[in-house]
Amino acid sequence: MIDFTPAERRIVRKMERLKAEAGSHSPSIFTLRQKLSEVEIRVDACFLSNPYATELFIEYFNREILETGRMRDLMECYPSQNQVIAETLAEFLRVDRRNIFIGNGAIEIIQAVIHNFTKRKVIINIPTFSSYYEYVKDGVEVIYNVLHKEDNYELDVDSYIDLVKEHRPDTIVLINPNNPNGAYTRVSAIRRILEEVPFVDQVIVDESFIHFAYEDDTYGLMSLSHLAAEYPNLVVVKSMSKDFGVAGIRAGYGIMSESRVQSLLRNGYLWNSNGLAEYFFRLYARADFAFRYEEVRVKYILENLQFIEQLKQVEGIKVYPSMANFVLIELPAGIRSADFVAKLLITYGIYVRVCDDKIGLDGQFIRLASRSSTENRYILQSINACLNFTLTKELVNEQVD
């Protein structure tokens, strides 16, 4: 148990109400600062992004937009249509422009694909990102493929293929690396899935965290984008907020068959970006930005690996294997995840994702995002302090009893 003062307990109750109002997602930083003004947030370890990439974008934005007066253009002028922005990405991504769909964040692409193309039955792994099953329309059957704790919530490819063949859905969903545990499925394994299930109309692979994954010591990017032309049922979803640290811009893209892209454009998604997102996409496709981004991407991966190894040394918690910029942590018995998250925020100013609402998790879990090396050191110190105080007090109470 974690003890709170009466004033702290009132804050805990506020946090629980805000989480309930936010549904299966976490309240934003802006919401917390408005509703919990008595709490100082020092580190956002809830929402997932590469802080070094954010700094890089801000550097370009200041120099090219703010200091040149071009901000007026972004505010006053309409952005380009969906396919014009797609064309700017095509050469960089080495994908035909007709197969690229630009989204107002990955969440819009998820909703658009699920609403428009999933008609009958979908298989979704759990635990995973909740929007995939929340956006399923009435009348569509949802089959959950349960990932097991004893397997670190990693995908068993053989049993998964058997399940898909048994139920023969029109859609399957794979998040790679998965959220909330960060488990990664190798490209060869996903290609095998694609080969084994050609009868599935949509194989959705969400690569929102793929820039943090790797398969060798070069840390090369492992995207499946290049397979879309080979497998017409493949739909690749890509958020830009996690790896580029620009969640506020609302930018994402999907790679899918031309027929799917055209269908979406005919159904309300022709003009769905804003000027700031278009600037980002054009910057993203530039060689100079890509070169510098690659440097901070690898820097962040190496720091993230070190952070995970240090977390594994913290006594009393279980850190699940991850190839994303976050880890799933199981707390010691007797500690409620909502209380632990509240204690970290109230006492240390660290905002962490509680995972009580994740279907498929059995126990008390939190999801902890990796930040800069300085912030990670502070997170480690705070978690150690919080756990040591709690576990020491628990031990004292046992001795007294």
Image (cartoon, rainbow, N blue to C red):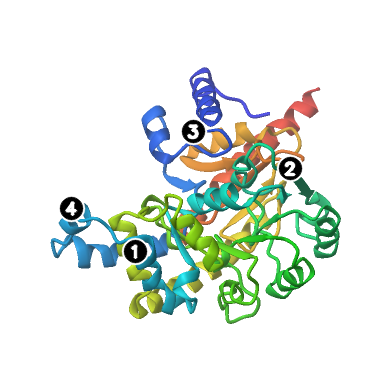
Q: Which residue is mark 3?
A: 346
Q: Position of residue 13 (x, y in %)?
A: 54, 22
Foreground of the two, 401 or 116: 116
Packing grade of label 4 (10 A; few <14, some 14-19, many >=20) is few
Q: Is residue 12 left or right of residue 195?
A: left
Mark in front: 3 vs 1: 1
Q: CA distance from mark 2 to mark 3?
A: 42 Å
Q: Residue at x 55, y 70 (%)?
A: 302
Is residue 303 visible in the rendered image? The answer is no
Q: Is residue 326 left or right of residue 194?
A: left
Q: Residue furthest left?
A: 69
| Picture disc at residue 141 | 2
Amino acid type of the residue tagged 3 in the rendering: Ile
Q: Which residue is mark 4?
A: 76
Mark in front: 2 vs 3: 2
Task: Give the quarter of the figure containing the C terminus.
Answer: top right
Q: Residue at x 54, y 38 (%)?
A: 344
Q: CA distance from mark 4 to mark 2?
A: 45 Å
Residue 77, relative to residue 190: is it above or below?
above
